[in-house]
Amino acid sequence: MATTLMRNTAPREHPGRYYGYMSAVAVLAIAVAGFTAVRSGAFDGGLFSVPFAFWLTAGLALVAEFRPNRWGGLWMSPIASIYLVYALATMITWGFLPALVVQSAAVTLLCVQIRASAWRTIFNVSQQGLALCVAWYVWDALSGSPTWGGTPLQILAIFAAGTAWPLVSSALVAYRQSLRTGERFLYLTWQWLKSEWALRATQIAIAPILATAAMSSWWLVAASAIPIFSVYRILQTAADREREADHDPLTGLLNRKGFQEVVDGKLADAAETKTAVALLILDLDRFADVNSALGHEVGDQLLVELAKRFTTDIPLGKKIAHLGGDEFAFVWSELDGMTDPMECAREIRARLDAPIVLGDVSLEVDGSVGIAVFPDDGPDFQTLFRHADIAMYESKQRAGTYTRYGAEFDHHSPERLHLLGDLRRALDHPDAPGVNLFYQPQVRLVDGEVIGAEALLRYSHPERGVVNPAEIIETAEHSSVMRMLTERVVDIALRQLRTWREAGYDLRMAVNVSVRDLQSPEFTDFLTERIDAYGVNAKRLQLEITESALMADPRRVLQNVQRLSDLGVGISLDDFGTGFSSMQHLRRLPVTEIKIDKSFVTTLCDDPDNAAIVSTTIDLGRALDVEVVAEGVEDEKVRRQLESWGCHAGQGWHFAKPMSADAFERWMAEQRKED
Ligand code: C2E
Ligand code: MG
Ligand code: MG
């Protein structure tokens, strides 16, 4: 278990102090326990003169610990177990030394089962030994008579001794933990006591009953085991449930709620000291594929393995959460030693480098990290979290590995949220005005024949007027509105295509599709259905996809593009040359056309670099047998140059600006007249 292994490691900083402390506890325990054993008169009557009831009690204490992996937690000490009842009962019935032997045997057994390292086992035996010594002194001082008689005073004494035990033990463990993680000692002690008090109180309350049973007959000791074990079971379930509230049961890491508490604490400290806190979100790529191809069990194992990787050798104060699904979150503050948030992201990514081996499967994992830093990127948990999420999404879009939040990525400013709401309202009703298409002709360069048109979105907002389509796409792309929008655009475009055919124009229609459309297979189904409904030829439809769309999730997008191509729909690589790996996409995709981006075309006569890019792209298209369309043709000089290079078609203001359907028809009619 990750947390168990983690506890076995020493902190990277000040390991000497850490081991020194543990050695001191061990030495002190030996000295104090030896002294106490002599003082308690343990050797006076001989250790083994105890009755059978003692052996039964000791046996039950060991049996009680003979269940591995009972606590999987960070907070809940795995040593928080049942033997305290038997140790206390033994102490008041048969004296200090038999109790120490029972307790030490039980702790050792437990440590073996949870795979604790040797020094950790020694520390646990020692710290609980010290706790028992203190408990014995309290008992000895208050009980009046060392022989258990069940008097009210003795009951009070055992309650006091029993209370001292967890106080000492928690403090010793919390101090070790504070050396490990850098967290405050008092805070840790409090956490420990808070998580264990119910269990401890019950054990302390049962101890005198067990002692009384042991004094009268060993049968009663045996019989008392049943209620002891059941009470314990109930408490354990309750404690587990409490723990689950802020931990993720699968990985043992914090969940979102627990994470928020930790981050809030760190932000408060950072605000006081004017220091920075980095919040990072990691989202794995293609995790859904692992689940669907290999099953959810393998997916879960993968997450557990990753949690292990992230928690090994973790720096002081850095906290990790599993937010569910394939998302992890990290927080690290300057006070904990964080110097560069980007370095923190690189470190997370480095831990994904090696493949994860599960049985005989070896899985490559990859993921995108988003970073938000307090105070620059947000004042509170909610804002930082949202911004880290936005940065993570941005990083995915760019197929980058990590990105720090920038206001320009935020598609959710209040203004944009309004726009989104208005757009949704306009799309909700099929006949509501506002969403429309403009058409811009595409012209064959050799003979000037109009071969088709690109459909371009025009949304006229009731107050803002016509909104820039790029802004609309950016806003809608991150929401379900995008799907509604594309469906509306496809619907209008196909209807227009049919109208043109009926009017005797044999044109093709180019429609832009967004990242989101290509990620869902439903889009293909929708398109097939609409093509059928309007009775248009699929070959007359051209889908323009941009490279950034392809980068978002290449495999899933590729699958959907292939399905669309199988339908007969043409695939056009829009804005060619502006992306990063155009060549790769050309090779892998069923592309039928390249659209050279207008940024190269418009200035090609004045800029030799752009001229070289455009002419090379045209050659490339010829070599790969795909058509090349140049967008942004603004004058005759450019048109002529493109024609001389053998470019297939052009689109741009030189021919016509985008226009409404009516204007387009008038324009077409004029073109015919001219011919
Ligand atoms: P795009 O697909 O590259 O569309 C070409 C853009 O270039 C259009 O801008 C068009 O008006 C503009 N343009 C055409 N000729 C010229 C020219 O000669 N010079 C210059 N400087 N510009 C020219 P628009 O209509 O503003 O569209 C911008 C972008 O918005 C489009 O770029 C496309 O990516 C996106 N878009 C437009 N409509 C839709 C749609 O229905 N769905 C999706 N997903 N995206 C769309
Ligand atoms: Mg386009
Ligand atoms: Mg374009």
Image: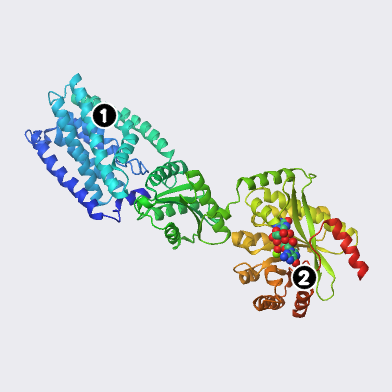
The reply to whether residue 566 is in sight is no
Q: Which residue is mark 2?
A: 650
Residue depth check, mark 2 versus mark 1: number of the one nearer the observer: 2
Would residue 579 be found to the left or right of residue 26 on screen? right
Q: Is residue 663 above or below residue 93?
A: below
Would residue 175 be found to the left or right of residue 461 on screen? left
Q: N-terminal of the two: label 2 or label 1?
A: 1
Q: Is residue 559 above or below residue 132?
A: below
Q: Secondary structure at mark 2?
A: strand
Residue 522, position in %: x, y?
A: 69, 52
Report the coloring of the rendering: rainbow
Residue 160, position in %: x, y?
A: 22, 27
Amino acid type of the residue tagged 2 in the rendering: Gly
Quadrant of the drawing holding the C terminus: bottom right
Amino acid type of the residue tagged 1 in the rendering: Ile
Q: Nearer the viewer, residue 233 or 602?
A: 602
The image quadrant of residue 32 is top left
Would residue 489 be found to the left or right of residue 161 on screen? right
Residue 308, position in %: x, y?
A: 40, 53
The quarter of the rendering in which ligand 3 is drawn is: bottom right
Q: Which residue is mark 1?
A: 204
Q: Mark 2: few, some, or many residues within 10 Å (few <14, many ≥20)?
A: many
Question: Which residue is at 68% across, 66% downward?
Answer: 575
Q: Is residue 575 above or below residue 36?
A: below
Question: Which residue is at 50% across, 52% downward?
Answer: 299
Count of numbered tags: 2
Q: Is residue 241 above or below residue 219?
A: below
Q: Nearer the viewer, residue 623 or 355?
A: 623
Q: Alpha carbon of mark 2 to alpha carbon of mark 1: how far?
A: 87 Å
Q: Mark 1: few, some, or many residues within 10 Å (few <14, many ≥20)?
A: many
Q: Secondary structure at mark 1?
A: helix
